[in-house]
Structures are given as C-alpha cells and as structure tokens.
Amino acid sequence: MGAIVWSFENFINTMLDIVVIKTGLVISESYLLEILIEEFPEDKRLPQYEEKKDYALRIRSEDFDEYCWAVRQRLGELEEVSPLFFKDINSMMTWMDKGYDPAKIFSKLIDFASDIHDPENPKLIDPNEILERAIKENIAPVPLIIEVMDGMINNQRISNVIKPVEEILWDGGIELSTLFEKESIPKSKSDFIEQKFINFLQANPEKLEFMHWRNFERLTAEFFKRKGFEVELGPGTNDGGIDVRVYDKKDNKKPYIIIQCKRHKESNQVKIETVKSFYTDVEFEGAKKGLIATTSKVAVGGKKVASIRKYPLEFAENEEIKVWVDKMKKR
C-alpha cells in the first residue's frame, strides 16, 4: 500500500466526510478528534491539530483505513472489521484444491452486478438478485458462491471509499447532538427512534444517561414495539406520570403495561416516593403491571416496598437498558 501526503486539515476533513456519509450521523470536527485521540493515544500529532492544521501529513493508506474504521465502530455503524476479502482463507484453499477459482467467481459476480446497475437510475443493488442468478447459472457450488458473495458484501460494507450512488442517495444524515439535546422524531413514521441512534448507544452504553429524556422514552417505546406489542407513546408533558402504554394485541381495551421512564445519571437513583406514586397510576389505569425504566437504578427502599406490598411493578435499570439496546442493534 502507498502513502498519502496532504495537509493535516485535509486529512481530518476527508475523514469527516467519509464517516458522516458512511454512518449517517453528522458529527463535529471536535468530536471526531476526540474519538481519534482516545482510540490512537500513541499518535501525538492528533492533540496538536489546532496548532498544526497546515502542516503536511504523510500517512499510509492502510493506516488511514484503520483510523476511519475506528471512528465508524465508535459511532456504532461497524461492529467487526476484517480487512481480509475472504474471512476463511483455509476454506478458499480447500475450494482451490478442488479445482475452483474464487477469483473467477468473484469476477463473475461483479459482471452480474454490472448488468443490474443502471447509470441513469443509480440505486443500491440487492445482493439477492446477484446470488439468485449465480445459483441459477450454476457458476459454482452454492456454498462457494455464498462465501464469495459474503466477502464481496463485507468488502463493500467496510470500504472507506464514498461511491457515487452513496452521494446520490445521501439524505443529509442526522445530527448526533440531537440525541442529547432535544427530542428527535425519526424520518420513518413507523419508528419511535432512529436505528442509527440505537447503534450508537449500543457502541457507547455510557452515553445512555446523557441522552435527552424524551429520546429515552422513545427508545423504551421502540423496544416494546419490537417485542410485538402495540405501543402508545405519551405526549411527553402533562402525561400524568405515564410515558408509554403497552397493549396486548389480543386485548387492547386496557394497557397490559404502563411505563414510567426516568432518564437519570447513574448516581441519581429513582426514589421510593416515585415507586409508591406510580403504583397508584397502575391501579387507576387497570394495567396488569407497571414498569419503571431508568438509566440509573431504583433505590433499595423502592424495590423493598414494592416487594412487601406486592405491587405489580417491575424495574428495568441501567444494565437491563443496555441489554435492550444490544438486542435492538442492526448493522
């Protein structure tokens, strides 16, 4: 691999463009630098960026990829990065011993993709179309076709090259800061929160306690929607302490669960008074049970009084919320 020489500022701006388009999350230059400094503490140039923007920087292309991948992982878009085209080299060697050439199969799959591509109407290509044609034309054993196809998809997924179709289809992204600063209404009306935010939170669970309280309510509503319930998100204010109502699809006359969300810092526990008060809401609504979901913890006294008095209450605390997010990630 060769080396690239450019100004320090151009290096950062180029990476910012790539990261924003690939992840769909719009971040600031300062946050990009914050991530880079944390991920690459051995690179003493990064903390000096403001003073040395105009300095020439020489960096190998594979190192540039490593920087980009690290940021994309921190933003939750990538989980694992394998720069090898074929993840299982031994498997490929076995196929070659049997007389098959994975490189020729790859070339054939590229030809199929080219046939599907319409330069007048660029769009993302469904890999299933390529796979179906390859199997139909019997270009190789199906397991080998799938392995090569997986390598092709992985290569495209982790690439740090912005392709023309990505620029054309770019929708402007979402400001990451809105996750923390204000209610963020997703572009899809069927969602309660953007998937990009869920992926970010899964990669950065320590940020849960800092998200905007309304977005935490949306995160909670999304979790129960994906569990197959009918979900009603409250108005956010003047809601009588009920943030989310969850209904059994077979019986939606009364809520199955009512939820109160408490987006607190981990050090700020949900108090016993909140638990007692919420129990009366459960009774009034006629719900089967109530749930207090919090990014912190419920005070021991609150759990104790619920247990002793047999309140139909459950508690989802910080660690369980992390599990929710982990279950909802999509990459």
Image (cartoon, helix red, strand yellow):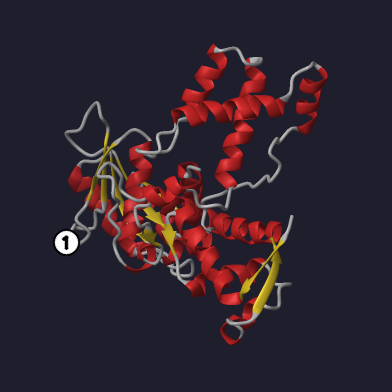
Quarter of the image holding residue 287? top left
| Residue 183 % position (x, y) | 29, 61
Q: Identify the residue at horizontal 71%, vertical 36% (top origin).
A: 87
Q: Is residue 297 left or right of residue 97?
A: left
Q: Residue at x 19, y 37 (%)?
A: 254
Is 111 left, or right, of 21 in this rendering? right
Q: Position of residue 263 (x, y in %)?
A: 38, 62
Q: Is residue 146 above or below residue 44?
A: above
Front residue of 219 and 12: 12
Can residue 298 be seen at all in this image of the molecule?
A: no
Determine the residue located farthest toward the front in the rendered image.
Answer: 120
| Pointer 1 residue | 238
Is disc 1 placed on a helix, strand or loop? loop
Can the viewer see residue 266? Answer: yes
Out of 150 and 135, give the one closest to the viewer.
Answer: 135
Q: Nearer the viewer, residue 312 or 296?
A: 296
The percent position of residue 117, horizontal first and vertical second, equals 44, 33
Residue 95 drawn above or below residue 32: above
Q: Is residue 233 above or below residue 136?
A: below
The amino acid beneath tag 1 is Asn
Dot 1, crowdedness within 10 Å: few (<14), some or many (≥20)? Answer: few
Tell me the residue at 39%/67% (across/down).
177
Residue name at image x 38 percent, y 43 percent: 223
Splitting the image into 4 quarters, where does residue 45 fall?
A: bottom right
Query: Looking at the picture, how far across and down is residue 101, in whole percent?
Result: 74, 23
Task: In this rendered view, identify the residue nearer to me: 270 or 161.
Answer: 161
